[in-house]
Image (spheres, rainbow, N blue to C red):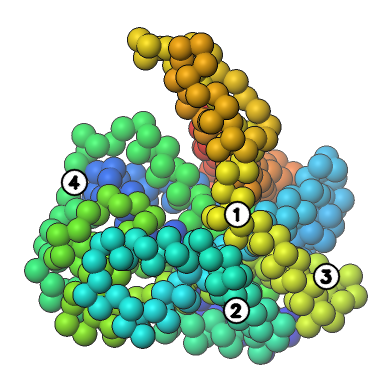
Amino acid sequence: MASDKRGMHGIWASRWTFILAAVGSAVGLGNIWKFPYITGEYGGGAFVLVYLLCILSVGIPVMMAEVLLGRKARMSPINTMHRLTEKYKAPAFFSGIGWMGAVAGFFILSFYSVIAGWTLYYSQEMVTGTFVSISADDAGAVFGGLLGDPATLIAYHTLFLFLVGFVISRGVHRGLETSLRMLMPLLFVMLLVLLGYSLTTPGFAQGWDFLFRFEPEKLSEEAIITALGHSFFTLSLGMGAIMAYGAYMPANSRLGKTILTVGALDTLVALVAGLVIFPIVFSNGLEPGAGPGLMFQTLPIAFGQLPGGIIIGTAFFVLVAIAAWSSAISLAEPAVAWAVEKGFSRVRATITVCALAWVLGLGTVMSFNHWENHQYFVTVTGIDQEGEVAFEDLRLYADVEVLRSTLGTTGGLTYEVKGKTFFDVLDFLTTNILLPLGGVLISLFVGWFMTRRAIADEARMKSERMLSLWRFMIRFVAPLAVLFVIYNGLI
């Protein structure tokens, strides 16, 4: 592995190792299902075009800025922002970017590992033939049984965090680099094998049409907001992961070309995943708009009916598990890197971070069963006999089952009670507030406080014109776009 006197954690062996790491961080559960689904929902090829424009104007510029910061300081995101804030005499609150990212990544890790545990469970169930010739009701019962069984959820939550911790504890070279060199090529190979199978299904043409038919009439304001938001979140921006990985990036790599490659591969994986999933869905007469439930309730029915479905279904869920694993590794790395800089051994730092994430993850486990009715930020809406809203009331916490039974039809009104579980609160806080806010602050810091000379030295762009264009995007376009995402997320 190459050496670099500025870094205590080590350096990726090559530019392509960084690309694999960054793509591993970006490609996760959202790529395998969410992006293909929203593409089909919001206009197919027209949506893809808008999404690519958003990637180029928001996602790539912010990602370059985040990597640049990490490589500049060669430290954990927390210490990187502390050092660079002092160096460039920026307001002190910019030093909080690293803390905000590390906390967001830690929160996400705590619930992401629970959801990722489902993929391990389903991989096992596929192998054992649970879904062979299964009915829709029985498939729903398997999923419902999983969510209602805290012991099983905790077991797979524990197993997944153990896999994450095992890789991180071995360090940048023996752990992150070695695992990503195996996991990412394996993910690509499995995806191509499944695509090959998908090409043989009778629903391939319909799946292709669902994804790529050019329907600009579907490009509503909501579709554009969705494309903008996903272009930011798909690259794992604002959580410190990319900054941490940037700290291990070789000094002679050019940022522009490297980050464009990451964005292209991330998008390609998402589209190929769509070409794997939807032909199977259409071939079996299933509903493509099933949302997140498709992966755990609808697809198993299809796999159970296919010749060789045990092999194909197992390969699919192992693929999803690998994608989740590579993403989760990047979520934990910022906090572990900071703990190492504070004097912890890497093993001790990993155990501490994963153990704390495990404990916090128990809240997510319980959100699907015992704590399901214990909700926060509960909105009570009273509706009169004409269907008009008579009043709205917000409560910070309520047992919604008790509240619904208490309200009944008091005052001749019917009531809608909606709130957020513990899991929903963590998801909302990270996705709608912490991550985009981190992206805005990163853009403003690099665009307005770092000198052009410092940026040019680190970015190593050949073209001054491209450097100027990128600085313009970072200064004006990206912050305004991400603030728009925050605004729409909050309302």
Sequence order check: which comes first, mark 2 or mark 3?
A: 2
In the picture of the structure, the residue carrying the numbered disc 3 is: 339
Residue sitting at 69 percent across and 68 percent down? 358
Task: Using the numbered discs, state the Cα–Cα distance from disc 2 to disc 4 in whole angstroms.
Answer: 43 Å
Quarter location, residue 74? bottom right
Question: Camera-side residue: 127 or 251?
Answer: 127
> Residue shown at 79%/59% (left/top)?
78
Q: Is residue 440 visible?
A: no
Task: Residue lying at the far left in this picture: please name it.
Answer: 202
Quarter of the image for the N terminus: give it. Answer: bottom right
The residue type indicated by label 3 comes to Ala
Tell me the kind of residue under disc 1: His
Q: Residue furthest right?
A: 343
Q: How many marks?
A: 4
- Marks 2/1: CA distance? 22 Å
Q: Are marks 3 and 1 in contact (CB under 8 Å)?
A: no
- Which quarter of the picture shows residue 319? bottom left
Position of 220 relative to 273 (above/below)? above
Closer to the camera, 455 or 172?
172
The residue labelled by disc 1 is 370
Cα distance between the residues tagged 3 and 1: 34 Å
In the image, residue 115 lies at what x, y percent?
A: 52, 64
Q: Where does label 4 land, which residue?
A: 214
Label 3 element class? helix
Residue 171: x, y in percent? 71, 83
Q: Which residue is mark 2?
A: 159
Around disc 4, counting alpha carbons within 10 Å, would you say few (fewer than 14), some (14 to 19), or many (20 or more)? Answer: some
